[in-house]
Image (tube, rainbow, N blue to C red):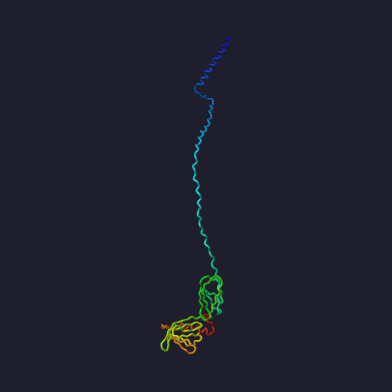
Amino acid sequence: MNRQFAVIGLAAVGFAVVTAVFVLRTDGPDLEEPSAAVERPVVEPSSPPAAAAPEPVAPTPRPAPAAPVAEAPVAVAAPPVTEAPPRGGLLRIESDVAGAQVFIDRRFIGAAPAIAEDVTPGRHELNVSAEGYDNAVLSIDVEPGERTIRIRFREVRLDAAIDVVHKHRFGSCTGRLIATPQRFRYETDNRNDGFTTSLLELESFEVDYLDTNLRVRLDGGRTLNFTDPDGDADRLFVFHRDVENARERLSRGDPPAPD
């Protein structure tokens, strides 16, 4: 029995020692054991605190959209209309004298009858010449399309007039000599001196340049002498030349131009 008590006593003492060691390890500072690996706890980052919900803000009222302003239409200038150039004219030039030479603006066209094609519309100068006749010079207005121009060289044209002094045997009177292809007349206030006749009925028609005198002998023998009021023999000469030329042409059969 004493042996049992001894074993129990030893067990009690061992328990006390173990308890004391346990108390010392628990209450004292932690001592690292060099042989033992220390596991450190893994610290996970803490989530940031949840943000506080924003307080509701009343929406700012937006201004109502302005009504669209109708823009004035922009006038767009129409492109200029380019007109086609006017079509040229076509001229047919005829003559009562065959082979008359035709010129337009001094450019030779040909012998009549001649055709000038594509003549620019507008004013042009036509010149036609025939041997033995005065040149025919005309200003013509050309338009698109065809036109025939007849030159009558053989028609006698005359429109001449001159102021004169009729020399009487005693005294004188003044008047005017007028000549056309159809007639030759003297107009004066002296009724006894006035007369009218045809060019071909003049028996003589002469000019004296030195004496400044125009002598006219009518059919039937009556003779009249005229002079220039200013003594200008040149005017008498020109009048005599034009009348005598018409008389010559009429005498060879050229027809007088109509009045």
* Closer to the camera in the image, 110 or 119: 119
Quarter the N terminus occupies: top right
* Closer to the camera in the image, 154 or 224: 224
Q: In this view, does 173 lie to the left or right of 129?
A: left
User: Residue 81, percent across and down?
Assistant: 53, 63
In this view, 25 is above or below 164: above
* Closer to the camera in the image, 30 or 240: 240
Q: Is residue 172 left or right of residue 116?
A: left
In this view, 100 is above or below 36: below
* Closer to the camera in the image, 56 or 87: 56
User: Residue 223, percent across and down?
Assistant: 46, 88
In this view, 105 is above or below 132: above
User: Residue 192, percent across and down?
Assistant: 45, 87
How many marks do you count on the picture?
0
List the single residue furthest toward the top: 1
